Amino acid sequence: MLQRIQTIYLLLAAIVSAGLIFVFSLWENSAGESVYAQDVLIAFGMFLASAAISLVSIFMFKNRKLQFVLGRLNIILNLFLLGVFVYWSLTLPGEMDISEKGIGMFLPIISIVFIVLANKAIKKDEDLVKSVDRLR
């Protein structure tokens, strides 16, 4: 059913991953120019993959186990993306490329929160269906 709360959570995660990357910059370089996700191909691809997994997961409502697994896969992808951002910001010497971190580096955290909430709702639905099956 599309009218469940996990649909809203997954839609919000997709909006964060695909929409807000064009609004918030990832960082500012030493010249003072804002760098967005579409300027960095790896980050852009991972953000779009996360949004695609969230959107595909919305329409897997008939197969809750697969929907739950896709949510976990999406969490792992966002954690990897967050790790890449931390690596980029900590290993570059001085102010060569990343001068000031932007809020866009923290978008994977927001996405992870929404996906975890969706997975909790999916698990709750799965437990409800199992309890009703036991009564038959």
Image (cartoon, grey):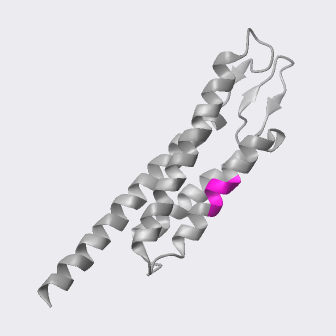
8 over 91 or under it: above or below: below
Q: Is residue 2 left or right of residue 34?
A: left
> In the image, which residues are magenta?
48-52
Q: How many marks?
A: 0
Q: In the rendered view of the protein, which quadrant contains the C terminus?
A: bottom left
The residue lying toward the viewer, choosing from 128 and 19, is 128
* Residue at the image point whose x is 39% and y is 60% from the top: 119
17 over 60 or under it: above or below: above
* Residue at the image point whose x is 18% and y is 77% from the top: 131
Q: Residue furthest left?
A: 135
76 over 55 or under it: above or below: above
Q: Position of residue 36 (x, y in %)?
A: 77, 38
- Residue 74 in view, yes or no: yes
50 part of magenta stretch:
yes
Q: Position of residue 6 (x, y in %)?
A: 43, 66
Q: Position of residue 31 (x, y in %)?
A: 87, 18
Q: Main secondary structure of the magenta part?
A: helix
55 part of magenta stretch:
no
Q: Is residue 70 left or right of residue 45?
A: left
* Residue at the image point whose x is 46% and y is 55% from the top: 72
- Residue 22 in view, yes or no: no
* Residue at the image point whose x is 49% and y is 47% from the top: 112
Q: Is residue 75 left or right of residue 124?
A: right
Q: Residue furthest top?
A: 94
